[in-house]
Image (spheres, rainbow, N blue to C red):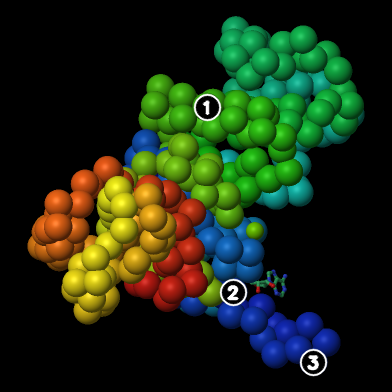
Amino acid sequence: MIQVESLQKTYPGRKGQPACRAVDSITFSVPKGQLLGLLGPNGAGKTTTVKMLCGLILPDTGRIFVNGKELTRSRIAALADISAVLEGNRNMYWRLTPRENLEFFAALKGINPAKIRGEINHYLERFRLAEKSDVEARKLSRGMQQKLAILVALISQSKVILLDEPTLGLDVQASHEIRQLLKEIVAEQGRTVILTTHDMNVVQDTCERVIIVNQGRVVADDSVHNLLDLFKVRVYKVTIAGELTGEQRASLLSMEEVLIQEELPHQTVVSVRLEKSEVLYEVIGILGSNNSVIESIDQEQNNFERVFLEIVEGGAQVV
Ligand SMILES: Nc1ncnc2c1ncn2[C@@H]1O[C@H](COP(=O)(O)OP(=O)(O)O)[C@@H](O)[C@H]1O
Ligand SMILES: [Mg+2]
């Protein structure tokens, strides 16, 4: 549905500042019906990428295809399949109510509002905006305005929805609600959604696939599941009752994968970094000699935040 080839964008420097290469060769494609997360720290180039995808700014080089149509060559045809909700830039009229906004933007797309009255009502209910359907948009809460912005994008019937930081600045509940709605819409309607965020939780919660960008480059492109797996920090904590003998201590300290984390008269905790699974068995062997009782072996939890930091800060490359 979306195909992006070697996109590059450099902004001219402001007031004697050097030029800024915001996007430095980004390539990816998105199949129909996928919810893709573009994740990256501030300044990574996410918004610039989205703005190029919806035709707001032109890339210096590279090509974008939307449903097979090339954006720079068949602009109108390509953009007909895209709706975007950009950060800070609301795609609605403040003085119109949610219902009027939806009718107006449907009409702009050539849809007869009378024909989709049922659909509008359904959406307003579903997005919990029904009670406020006759209140001017400017008077709604920030979370409700954001939901309305997404609805305006949906009512256009576009096959591709781009959302730049859809949960930024929202409270926990509104953010959760928006994530749920997005998942449902992708599942039910087969729309293709690309969302940007710097919030790992949003990605972990909603996206099947994540592309991590850093300094204008793709540094990871995989399913959330695989990325978690790949970076599974295989660290085990082995806890034994009592102290180590001198011999046990010497054997453990001779292994570079092992760290004695805590040594108390009643309990000793040893952490083992696992590159090879044999190491754990060796450690268990050493601890088990002298009849020490192993109380527990725990694997340290991994989460997406850690994976993200490892990729972005550790310079890991997973393309
Ligand atoms: N209009 C602009 N003029 C000059 N530099 C810009 C402009 N917009 C963004 N940048 C710079 O481009 C880089 C990428 O910005 P952006 O795409 O907004 O990143 P993100 O959305 O990932 O935070 C940043 O270094 C930013 O300062
Ligand atoms: Mg941004």
Cα distance between the residues tagged 2 and 3:
17 Å
**In the rendered structure, which amino acid carries the disc numbered 3?**
Gly
Residue 311, visible in the rendered structure: yes
Cα distance between the residues tagged 1 and 2:
31 Å
Task: Kindly indicate whether the residue at mark 2 contacts the one at mark 1 (C-beta within 8 angstroms).
Answer: no
Residue at x 12% of width, y 58% of height: 289
Ligand 1 within 8 Å of the CB at mark 2: yes
Q: Position of residue 96 (x, y in %)?
A: 84, 25
Toward which corner of the image does residue 6 lie, by quadrant? bottom left
Q: Residue under label 3, please give it.
A: 16
Lower position in the chain sequence, tag 2 or tag 3: 3
**Camera-nearest label, 3 or 1:** 1
Q: Residue under label 2, please give it.
A: 22
Task: Kindly indicate whether the residue at mark 1 contacts the one at mark 3 (C-beta within 8 angstroms).
Answer: no
Q: Is residue 9 above or below residue 87?
A: below
Q: Quadrant of ligand 2?
A: bottom right
Q: Residue under label 1, please give it.
A: 180
Badge 1: residue crowd in 10 Å (few <14, some 14–19, many ≥20): few
| Foreground of the two, 120 or 261 | 261
Left or right side of 72 for 105: right
Cα distance between the residues tagged 3 and 1:
45 Å
Residue at x 39% of width, y 55% of height: 265
Q: Position of residue 298 (x, y in %)?
A: 30, 46
